[in-house]
């Protein structure tokens, strides 16, 4: 069935779904076959954590190279974040800033959605980006060891994206147009499949106990943000999904940093 994750005997669907997800979430030079590209994004959302794994791995390699060149740990951490921003086109950071401006500045639902459509960034958005980049960079620098940083980045990017299909499944779009509405609603199998893949990646990368703590913490933070968006906006938008990803990524890195110390 097209609305279920591919089986192990369907490598073409695995690759097609991954390319579909990667072409949306990143700027990596991957393109899905016409049939996959025409399908709703939700059908390929099981691959979100695998795309996160690739983003985290590339970011971690950039950190390891920077450390190898004897750069300060904080500078190496910022370079790693810069690589992830370059790969994704800053789409999640943009969503975080727009969501912070909308939820923090609008008087009612319509005003909040209008603010989120505005390309200009306000005080809430600036502060949200400062805290997000600052906390993530501090966590990465605190972990220090290149191998552990790579593992933490892989887990953070996989979990932060792997939980998004559950939001697509549980809520409705806040508006009839935009990326959130166009993504579609994944089946239960796709949504829980994505969450399961992200959990396996986190438990393997961080070890069982810290991985489990990171999963629980990310689920709580992302759920709280999703509930807030539901109450204030009536559902999710593409910007809200970006803000959820940033929250999950930050929490997993902070848990990994706390465990490393």
Image (cartoon, rainbow, N blue to C red):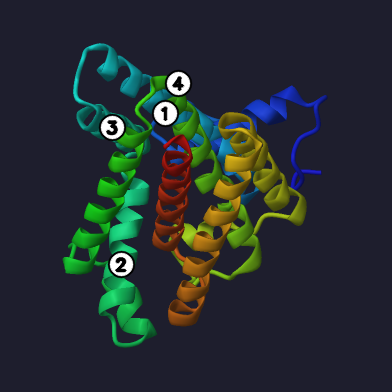
Q: Residue 77's mark?
A: 3
Q: Quadrant of residue 71?
A: top left
Q: Please name the residue shown 58% across and 49% down the image.
A: 213
Q: Is residue 44 visible?
A: no
Q: CA distance from mark 2 to mark 1?
A: 28 Å
Q: Residues within 10 Å of mark 3 (few under 14, many from 20)?
A: many
Q: CA distance from mark 2 to mark 3?
A: 24 Å
Q: CA distance from mark 3 to mark 1?
A: 9 Å
- Precedes in sequence: disc 2 or disc 1: 2
Asked if the residue under mark 3 is in contact with the one under mark 4, i.e. CB atoms within 8 Å, the reply is no
Q: Nearer the viewer, mark 2 or mark 3?
A: 3
Asked if the residue under mark 2 is in contact with the one under mark 4, i.e. CB atoms within 8 Å, the reply is no
Q: Please name the residue shown 74% across and 40% down the image.
A: 5
Please state if 212 lies on the left or on the right of 21 as rendered. Answer: right
In which quadrant will I find the N terminus? top right
Asked if the residue under mark 4 is in contact with the one under mark 1, i.e. CB atoms within 8 Å, the reply is yes
The residue labelled by disc 4 is 147
Please state if 175 lies on the left or on the right of 142 as rendered. Answer: right
The residue labelled by disc 2 is 100
The residue labelled by disc 1 is 149
Please state if 160 lies on the left or on the right of 168 as rendered. Answer: left
Q: Nearer the viewer, mark 4 or mark 2?
A: 4
Q: CA distance from mark 4 to mark 3?
A: 13 Å
């Amino acid at each position: 069935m097209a609305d279920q994750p591919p089986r192990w005997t369907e490598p073409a669907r695995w690759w097609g779904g991954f390319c579909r997800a990667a072409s949306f979430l990143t700027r990596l030079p991957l393109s899905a076959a016409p049939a996959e590209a025409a399908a709703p994004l939700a059908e390929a959302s099981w691959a979100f954590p695998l795309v996160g794994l690739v983003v985290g791995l590339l970011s971690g390699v950039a950190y390891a190279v920077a450390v190898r060149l004897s750069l300060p740990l904080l500078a190496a951490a910022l370079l790693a974040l810069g690589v992830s921003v370059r790969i994704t086109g800053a789409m999640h950071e943009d969503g975080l800033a727009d969501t912070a401006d909308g939820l923090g500045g609008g008087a009612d639902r319509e005003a909040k959605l209008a603010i989120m459509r505005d390309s200009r960034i306000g005080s809430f958005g600036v502060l949200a980006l400062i805290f997000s980049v600052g906390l993530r960079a501090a966590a990465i620098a605190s972990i220090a060891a290149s191998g552990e940083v790579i593992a933490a980045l892989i887990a953070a990017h996989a979990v932060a994206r792997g939980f998004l299909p559950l939001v697509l499944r549980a809520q409705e779009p806040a508006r009839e147009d935009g990326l959130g509405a166009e993504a579609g609603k994944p089946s239960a199998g796709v949504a829980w499949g994505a969450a399961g893949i992200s959990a396996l990646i986190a438990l393997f990368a961080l070890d069982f106990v810290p991985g489990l703590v990171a999963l629980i913490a990310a689920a709580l933070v992302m759920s709280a943000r999703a509930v807030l968006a539901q109450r204030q906006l009536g559902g999710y938008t593409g910007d809200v999904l970006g803000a959820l990803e940033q929250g999950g990524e930050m929490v997993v890195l902070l848990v990994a940093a706390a465990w490393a110390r």
